[in-house]
Amino acid sequence: MAIALVTGASRGIGKATALQLAGEGYTVAVNFHHNITAATEVINHIVEAGGKAFAVRADISDEAQVMAMFDSIDREGEPLTALVNNAGILFEQSTIESLSAERINRVLATNVTGYFLCCREAVKRMSHKHGGKGGAIVNVSSAASRLGAPGEYVDYAASKGAVDSLTTGLALEVAAQGIRVNCVRPGLIYTDIHASGGEPGRVDRVKAMLPMQRGGQPEEVAQAIAWLLSDKASYVTGSFLELAGGK
Ligand code: NAD
């Protein structure tokens, strides 16, 4: 079959996506940064269900680590045909006056540079221009790219705006090379990303403002990502799918 790389796949949306894609027949490259125990649990889960997966450690903001990760994927002997750029970071709520340069740079390094580096290495392997079989990329952005997240995390929202723009440009650049590039924009999804910082009750407050009156589950994002990667979406590129309960 073929390999799908999911970044940040040891928990949350990345974990749900890894499980979904394994169920659809991909061999899943489970990227993790620190937590090898959690990554191993994801792999065990996939293998017990009859699927195939392996772990690849890399900090996606580090160019050398990203290149080494893709080299290790090459050694598996199956073509890489799917990339899910999912790993991302969000810091505690803050107004602009308190945003340090260090925080801004860390957010951009992971949420933007990391996505660029993984796209670059994936395109080198998927592109018909380089003898590849083609493939599909899904970038995980956020509803925050449209809404701005004022008073909370404009740095995060801006990083996701860059992800949107990367999607548009790269989709056009590689459309004739057999690669589709699409984007999902989740709203409130119940994962651990909301555990750090945030005022007490924030999740309930946000939920109450949503037309569907509920947050989403990681599996609901995973299913949309899997569809965008699949041949069912063979004429879809440069598109944005809102997964935000109507907001
Ligand atoms: P999460 O915190 O549960 O998972 C993020 C994963 O990314 C973790 O496994 C973490 O270890 C990994 N990661 C972080 N920095 C990394 C790095 N430098 N290198 C490699 N891995 C790294 O969060 P989640 O909610 O599952 O978020 C996944 C994606 O969805 C993120 O891009 C996030 O911005 C986006 N998103 C989430 C929500 C939400 O409400 N949960 C909404 C919109 C968008």
Image (cartoon, rainbow, N blue to C red):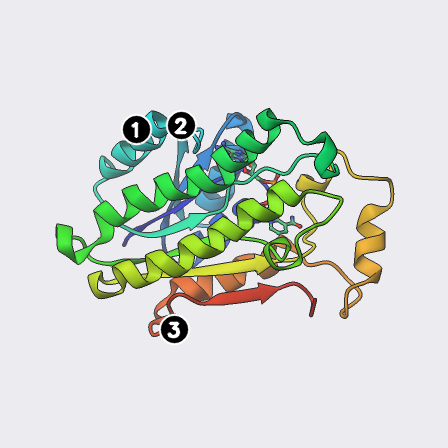
| Residue 182, image x, y percentages | 42, 61
Q: Is residue 159 above or below residue 34?
A: below
- For the N terminus, give its image quadrant: bottom left
> Mark 3: which amino acid?
Lys
The picture places residue 163, in percent across and down from the top left corner, at 48, 51
Any mark on residue 68, and which? 1
Vertically, is 133 above or below 9?
below
Q: Are marks 2 and 1 in contact (CB under 8 Å)?
A: no
User: CB at mark 3 closer than 8 A to ligand 1?
Assistant: no
Q: CA distance from mark 2 to mark 1?
A: 10 Å
Q: Position of residue 172 (x, y in %)?
A: 31, 63
Q: Residues within 10 Å of mark 2 (few under 14, many from 20)?
A: some
Q: Nearer the viewer, mark 2 or mark 1?
A: 2
- The residue tagged with tag 2: helix, strand or loop? loop
Q: Is residue 225 left or right of residue 27?
A: right
The image position of residue 62, as x and y in percent, is: 40, 27
Q: Which residue is mark 2?
A: 62
Left or right for 109, reference 245? left
Residue shown at 48%/33% (left/top)? Answer: 109
Marks 3 and 1: which is nearer the front? 1
